[in-house]
């Protein structure tokens, strides 16, 4: 542990930066160009996820996107009702300075949203459109979107615990790049969950950071391959108990912020575990839940009456 755990001292104020939002909207989008588009999952993974970099030169958006914000993409064409396709949001996965420090480049991480329901195979409109674009192709974009899901301005005062499932790791790639570049001294933990090891995203980058920096910890929770000590499956939320030696002092410090991003529903399990382990400062409780023992909270109560506190940042989709 570094000395950046101020348990006992006053908790630092969370100062969020002022950011630009909605400079371009679905009614008034701007045209950008694809700079690069490559698969970033293992070749053998059936889940095709791509790292896509967009060139913003001449759009008025150069240097504007912050890590944690999202880019709006307008896919061409119409839906089954004859209306233009709606905007879809994609998290920025580059740091605020731009991909590779270049202000005109912004990246995102896109999963092809395809699924079979009752024997019918459906393909997602925008994720497949984006995934099929080639360097040099143009696309209509909007944004930036989002004004709270950001790193605070006073990052040096905090430890960070990031929970990601799948493409939910996108904002954390950019945020962690920024923290590393700033020489962050506090603890940085990334808990990444996915079904198979072949679905790990930006694995080499995060493994390298973990190996090089004593304060960076990369924990992978591979639900269909890894098993907990009791034989049960590992999920992002089980890390709170599975790695309690590392995580308890960090989560127990009053200068730690929790971020979670990824699949809708992931927050419930994380909030349940935080509550059961006594880390209630990350939660804001509705109704009379505060009067009940967290060990007795029902799943329904967890879903409807537990919200993120100001120390928790949630983006699920
Ligand atoms: C803030 C935010 C950030 C996001 N960041 C990312 C990101 O970084 N990366 C990322 O990949 N995604 C991200 N998303 C999700 C993204 O916006 C899209 O929702 C996602 O890509 C699916 O869009 P689509 O147009 O491809 O699929 P859609 O066409 O909207 O379809 C949605 C799903 O339904 C299925 N489907 C289509 N028709 C039917 C039908 N009739 N019956 C049953 N199923 C059907 C499709 O196969 C698909 O799986 C984010 C969302 C939000 C809100």
Image (cartoon, rainbow, N blue to C red):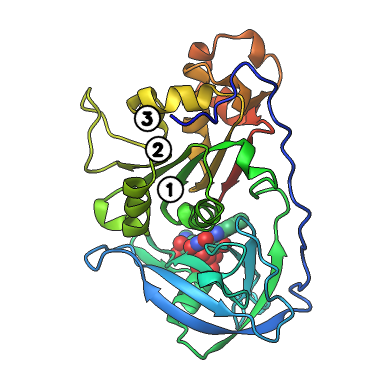
Q: Which residue is mark 2?
A: 236
Name the side, left or right, on which 205 lies relative to 232: right
Residue 123 falls in image quadrant? bottom left
Q: Nearer the viewer, residue 105 or 37?
A: 105
Q: Disc 2 vs disc 1: Cβ atoms closer than 8 Å?
A: yes
Looking at the image, which residue is at 54% across and 55% down?
Answer: 171
Q: Which residue is mark 1?
A: 165
3D distance between C-alphas at marks 2 and 1: 8 Å
3D distance between C-alphas at marks 2 and 3: 6 Å
Query: Is residue 118 visible in this depiction of the protein?
Result: no
Residue 14, compared with residue 164, is above or below; it is above
Badge 3: residue crowd in 10 Å (few <14, some 14–19, many ≥20):
some
Q: Nearer the viewer, residue 124 or 215?
A: 215
* Mark 2 CB within 8 Å of ligand 1: no
Looking at the image, which residue is at 60% across and 42% down?
Answer: 314
Q: Disc 1 vs disc 3: Cβ atoms closer than 8 Å?
A: no
Point out the image quarter for the N terminus: top left
Residue 277, compared with residue 304, is above or below; it is above
Badge 1: residue crowd in 10 Å (few <14, some 14–19, many ≥20):
many
Q: Which residue is mark 3?
A: 238
Residue 282, compared with residue 34, is above or below; it is above
Looking at the image, which residue is at 59% across and 78% down?
Answer: 75
Q: Position of residue 56 (x, y in %)?
A: 63, 80
Say what secondary structure mark 1 lies in.
strand
């Amino acid at each position: 542990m570094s000395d950046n755990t101020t348990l006992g001292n006053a908790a630092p104020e969370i100062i969020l930066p002022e950011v630009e939002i909605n400079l371009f909207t679905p009614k008034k989008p701007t045209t950008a160009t694809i700079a690069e588009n490559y698969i970033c999952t293992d070749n053998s993974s059936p889940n095709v996820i791509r790292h896509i970099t967009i060139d913003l030169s001449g759009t008025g958006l150069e240097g504007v996107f912050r890590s944690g914000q999202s880019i709006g993409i307008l896919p061409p064409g119409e839906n089954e009702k004859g209306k233009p396709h709606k905007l879809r949001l994609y998290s920025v996965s580059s740091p605020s300075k731009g991909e590779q420090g270049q202000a005109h480049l912004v990246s995102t991480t896109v999963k092809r949203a395809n699924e079979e329901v009752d024997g019918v195979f459906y393909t997602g409109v925008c994720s497949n459109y984006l995934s099929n674009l080639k360097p040099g192709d143009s696309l209509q974009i909007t944004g930036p979107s989002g004004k709270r899901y950001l790193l605070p301005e006073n990052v040096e005062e905090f430890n960070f615990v990031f929970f990601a499932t799948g493409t939910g790791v996108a904002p954390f790639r950019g945020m962690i790049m920024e923290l590393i570049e700033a020489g962050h001294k506090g603890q940085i933990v990334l808990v990444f969950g996915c079904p198979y090891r072949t679905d790990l995203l930006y694995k080499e980058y995060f493994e390298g950071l973990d190996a090089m920096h004593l304060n960076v910890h990369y924990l992978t929770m591979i639900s269909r391959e890894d098993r907990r000590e009791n034989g049960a499956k590992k999920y992002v939320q089980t890390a709170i108990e599975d790695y309690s030696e590392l995580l308890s002092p960090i989560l127990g410090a009053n200068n730690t912020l929790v971020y979670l991003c990824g699949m809708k529903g992931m927050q419930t399990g994380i909030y349940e575990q935080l509550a059961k382990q006594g880390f209630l400062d990350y939660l804001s409780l509705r109704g009379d839940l505060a009067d009940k023992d967290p060990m007795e909270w029902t799943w329904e109560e967890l879903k409807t009456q537990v919200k993120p506190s100001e120390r928790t940042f949630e983006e699920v989709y």
